[in-house]
Image: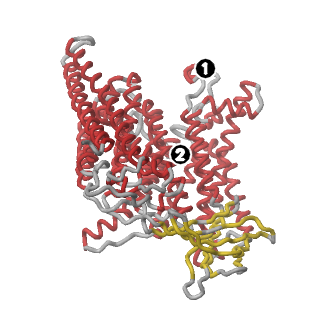
Amino acid sequence: MNTHPMPEFGSFSLMLALALSVYTFVVGAISLFRSHREIARGAQIGSPALALSSRLQESARRAGIASFVAVLAAAFALIWAAMTNDYSVSYILHHTNRELTTAYKFAALWSGQEGSLLLWAFLLSAYGFVLRVRHKVDVRLSAYASTILASAQVFFLLLITEASHPFAIQPGPVAENGFGLNPLLQYPEMIIHPPMLYLGYVGFTVPFAFALGALMMRYPGEKWIHITRRWTMVTWMFLTCGIMLGAHWAYSVLGWGGYWGWDPVENASLMPWLTGTAFLHSVMMQEKRGMMKSWNVWLIFSTFLLTLLGTLLTRAGLVSSVHAFAQSSIGTWFYGFMLVVLSVCVFTFFLQKDHLKSENRLESVVSREASFLFNNMILLAACFVVLWGTLFPILSEYVDGTKTTVGAPFYNRVNIPIGLFLLMLTGVGPLLAWRSTSLRAIRRNFVLPGIAVVASAVVLIIAGVRPWSAGDDWQSVFFSLMAFSGGAGVITAIFAEFLRGASVVRTQTGRNLAASALTLVQRNTRRYGGYLVHFGIVVMFIGIAGGAFNRSHEQEMGFGDSMQMGPYKVVCQSYTQDSNPVYETDFALLDVYRNGKKVTQLAPEKRFYLASSTPMTVVALHSTAISDLYVIFEGRNPDSDKPIIKVFLNPLMIWIWIGVVIVVLGTMVALIPAAGARKRETSPATLPESLTEVHHA
């Protein structure tokens, strides 16, 4: 009698998905090879040989679509097992229990290694589904991309079915309850953080597939970039959200007062974000000037390889991290797949490199092209620093047997100056013209931003932001001063560009300035959406720069005891213990006063989860536009039995999260098709691509 119908259904679905993906890859490759050979022989469209290749290609496409349905069925089977408390499945036993809410049982799909790999395979098949449904955008290029995508699907499905099976049956009698979900993951953001991060990670497979396919078939022109631009932007947006949701989770849950500790797994997500950001900028040079073709190909190749490296670091147990999964044997699989991917990329590049010759050269270092080039160099320098620091413990252990960890001071010492230079380019780049910028235009466009930089620096120094008075923290204060004043300059430059463009539209249409600004954005959503993204990045920099002025204090607090932290007075009203079927808790009730007036009550906790025997800190937070009051319950003094409370005052923290929201909104604006784009190409009233050209007229 079949006692495990759903796990067996899930296993069958995975095997079916694997078979369909193999068919998609093999038959797709055969059809492409046949069509390439027949075209080389001079076959005409509609010939029997090409018709057969077309039919094979169509069957491969449909098999790829069917593979999505099969992986979806497998994901449903795992979620169903979690919802119905099927502890015969080893994965469900170790990652859920009966007391979990429905949302956290659903989140069990990605809480462990096997489930997270299934999520990866599902999202990859979903991206492939969209690609194959939209194949008529460019049938032949889509066929190449679909076949390459299928090869990645084959790898992950093989990995799931052979090395990390989510439907493995637990030996012995079925348990009555599970071990529960990791308490650190029992936080609302963890329901959306991993899927967002995976949507970014997995999504970069699509532009990689298009780039490799375009190179293999010697695709003429730059149309493949236009086709993949939205893919890349959506993927980049998801990865940005995933990274920042993870940072907010670390800030709100881990209880150390910060949001980014240069943890290896944090670094693993940051590296493809950096190269993906570089790619989004440098492809503009290929679109506009036919430059940096080889560079762009390797940027997207590297981004895909870095997503694989990040997955390897997280799942193979190579690094120690609160985010990483336990030691496992799947590292060998990833090493092999990465070697195959790199070999294919190198071979295809050298075979087709004559197809990637630049059509133009850099004419001036004071130009839009030069700013993009410098932008790329800075982003890649930051990526190299992060990669080196992340891999250094592994390399040092391999060389001399000692694992030497690289700490946050190393990353900060190198990346903070890099970040400030990048901030400067964020404001400078849009003010430069293509090819070359005249001295007159430089003087005109940089006057207002320059005044803003100097004026804000003077105001901040008067207000007390003085590096020479900061003692050992002088470097942090100096970098913050530069970030604040530089941010003011960039914001001024962005608003000036909006104002200039809106003024041109107002002259053309006679509308008011607000309506003209809206029309301006609608006419060139990509450009002005990009400005919003840059504005959001600057807001994030301002929030990050506030970290130079963080303060903290720790003390024992009994009934009525108080602590002063900046403008806040924290008073302990009570402390007690409680329990429920999920966890035991120790917490304090703290009244918070500002200028003698009570503003809130906070309740920091220390929990002990019963199913997993795991302690957890629950942060209490009071957030304003000026600062965050961040309070944690560190435990009890064994001698007095009084709670030990630690309080952080973190200035400007909220602006990091506001900046992320602006970045996402800007990306969405850039994704909207511009109004009447084709009409504007021939219209004499068209706005120039760069408003700096207005000033040359």
Q: In which quarter of the image is the C terminus?
A: top right
Disc 2 is placed on an element classified as loop
Tell me the residue at 38%/27% (across/down). Answer: 221
Q: Earlier in the sequence, mark 1 or mark 2?
A: 2
x and y, in percent, of residue 298 in the image: 35, 44
Mark 2 is surrounded, within 10 Å at the Cα level, by few (under 14), some (14 to 19) or many (20 or more) other residues, namely many
Q: Is residue 76 left or right of residue 423?
A: left
Labelled pair 1, 2 in contact (Cβ < 8 Å): no
Nearer to the camera, 113 or 235: 113
Mark 1: which amino acid? Answer: Ser
The residue that appears at 42% across and 65% down in the rendered structure is 612
Q: Circle 1 is placed at which residue position?
A: 683
Is residue 88 shown above or below 628? above
Which residue bears the numbered disc 2?
Answer: 366
Measuring from the top left, give residue 213's x and y in whole percent: 31, 33
Q: Quadrant of residue 511?
A: top right
**Secondary structure category for the residue under label 1:** loop
Q: Is residue 313 left or right of residue 378?
A: left
User: From the viewer's perspective, is residue 547 above or below residue 208?
Assistant: below
Placement of 125 over or under 682, stated as above or below: below
The one of 589 and 687 positioned closer to us in this rendering: 589
Task: Give the foreground label among 1 and 2.
Answer: 1
Q: What residue type is labelled 2?
A: Val
Which residue is found at the position 24% from the left and 15% from the top?
51
Residue 631 place in picture, x, y as percent: 62, 69
> How many numbered discs, if any?
2
Q: Residues within 10 Å of mark 1 (few under 14, many from 20)?
A: few
Image quadrant containing the N terminus: top left
**Label annotation for residue 31:** none
Judge whether residue 41 can be spotted in this image. Answer: yes
> Is residue 431 visible to us here?
no
